[in-house]
């Protein structure tokens, strides 16, 4: 650890270093009090010259054509520096007052004591701006609030318009789709209003479906001429895994002929309770099997009819029937008929 050039005691952080000889001095050894030491700026400290080097410089310098140069610090003082390190006392406890090292005027001392600091500047700004700042902040908050309200209103209005347009387009599309489905259902129903469907009639090779149909009309006593029959054919199964025979679809010339055959088949089944129409009534060889004469329903209606019959059985409904493409159920002979429009309608049965 280096020592003070004046007192030879170890140096601490509160020292001055000579620019020429690089000697270190306690500020106490230079007869500078603490306030004066901390008033010295970095520029003054970096250009400071110790008393010894200062004396040498003065003796060797020619001042014939040069003005008298002021001392290095403090620059704001009008008094010259007169530092001396003659006979310094050790800086162990306290220092005797050596000859004056730094002569400062009372005005300079007061200036150092009352030096401008950042805290004082801040306090001054706060004092000057406190009143106007409050008014400014109130005005700023109001303007900001109004701007934010207008911005949010504008953005929400635009977003709501987009959502409304999308919802309207979606609703229009759904309505159009429902309308189209209703029209297709109506067209499909109209295309089937001349048809009947014969279900579970045994299927044979080289069978004559026209003869089977005429025999059916003869059994149920429904007079139908050949000119009233437009087509008679078997159709593909909806479920290929089923072992039931393919259904026979018959197309008549008018809906009235179709209704005549359906009514006659219904009367026959009602007059033969527990038996109904059987394959033996159509002169089909083999074990007699029950078959059914129904309206020609679409695949969707057939699925709904099947679900209705299952629900009616679970809920102890006595009657399930189809008329003009509509599915009906009835609890018993004394209850009214219920129309089944869709699967949701089946919840009414439970």
Image (cartoon, grey):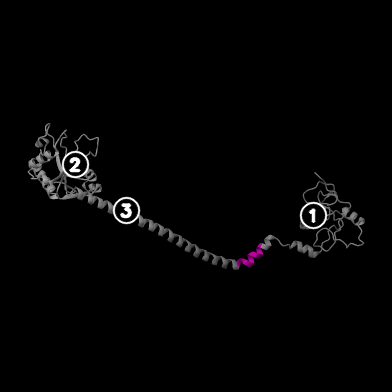
Q: SS of the residue at dot 1?
A: helix
Where on the picture, by quarter, is residue 249? top left
Estimate the spatial distance between the alpha carbons at disc 2 and disc 3, rounded to whole Å: 35 Å
Do the residues bearing badges 3 and 1 touch, measured as CB atoms within 8 Å? no
According to the image, label 3 marks what residue?
174
Do the residues bearing badges 2 and 3 touch, measured as CB atoms within 8 Å? no
Q: Based on the picture, tell me whether residue 19 belongs to the magenta stretch.
A: no
Task: Give the side of residue 109 with respect to residue 128, left or right.
Answer: right
Identity of the residue drawn at 25% across and 50% down = 184
Task: Give the side of residue 151 with respect to residue 119, left or right.
Answer: left
**Percent of width and height locating residue 88:** 86, 51
Query: Where the N terminus falls, by quadrant?
Result: top right
Q: SS of the residue at dot 2?
A: helix
**Percent of width and height locating residue 242:** 22, 35
Question: Mark 1 or 2 closer to N-term?
Answer: 1
Vertical side of 89 occupied by 268: above or below:
above
Task: Give the numbered dot on residue 313.
Answer: 2
Q: Is residue 321 visible?
A: no
Q: Name the residue nearer the viewer: 93 or 168.
A: 168
Task: Give the side of residue 136 with respect to residue 278, left or right.
Answer: right
Q: Please identify, in this view, whether the residue under mark 3 or under mark 1 is nearer the observer.
A: 3
Task: Give the numbered dot on residue 45.
Answer: 1
Q: Please identify, in this view, whether the residue under mark 2 or under mark 3 is nearer the observer.
A: 3
Give the magenta range.
Answer: 122-130
Answer few, some or many: residues within 10 Å of disc 3's Cα (few below 14, many 20 plus, some between 14 and 19): few
């Amino acid at each position: 650890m280096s020592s003070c050039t004046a007192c030879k005691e170890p140096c601490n952080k509160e020292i001055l270093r000579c620019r020429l000889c690089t000697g270190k001095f306690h500020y106490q050894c230079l007869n500078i009090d603490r306030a004066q030491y901390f008033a010295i700026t970095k520029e003054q400290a970096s250009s400071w010259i110790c008393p010894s080097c200062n004396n040498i410089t003065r003796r060797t310098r020619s001042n014939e054509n040069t003005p008298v140069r002021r001392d290095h610090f403090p620059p704001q003082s009008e008094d010259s520096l007169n530092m001396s390190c003659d006979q310094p006392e050790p800086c162990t406890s306290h220092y005797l007052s050596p000859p004056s090292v730094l002569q400062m005027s009372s005005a300079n001392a007061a200036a150092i004591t009352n030096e401008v600091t950042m805290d004082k500047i801040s306090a001054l700004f706060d004092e000057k701006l406190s009143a106007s700042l409050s008014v400014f902040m109130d005005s700023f908050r109001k303007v900001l609030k109004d701007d934010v309200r207008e911005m949010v209103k504008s953005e929400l209005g635009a977003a709501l318009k987009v959502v409304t347009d999308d919802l309207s387009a979606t609703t229009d599309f759904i309505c159009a789709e429902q309308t189209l489905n209703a029209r297709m259902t109506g067209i499909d129903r109209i295309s089937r209003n001349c048809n009947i469907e014969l279900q579970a009639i045994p299927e044979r090779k080289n069978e004559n479906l026209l003869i089977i149909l005429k025999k059916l009309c003869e059994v149920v006593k429904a007079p139908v001429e050949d000119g009233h029959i437009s087509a008679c054919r078997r159709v593909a199964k909806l479920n290929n895994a089923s072992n039931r025979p393919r259904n026979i679809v018959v197309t008549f010339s008018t809906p009235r002929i179709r209704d005549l055959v359906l009514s006659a088949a219904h009367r026959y089944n009602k007059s033969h309770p527990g038996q109904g129409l059987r394959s033996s009534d159509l002169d089909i060889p083999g074990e007699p099997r029950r078959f059914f004469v129904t309206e020609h329903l679409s695949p969707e209606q057939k699925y709904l009819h099947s679900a209705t019959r299952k629900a009616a059985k679970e809920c102890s409904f006595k009657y399930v029937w189809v008329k003009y493409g509509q599915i009906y159920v009835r609890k018993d002979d004394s209850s009214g008929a219920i129309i089944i429009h869709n699967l949701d309608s089946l919840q009414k049965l439970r």
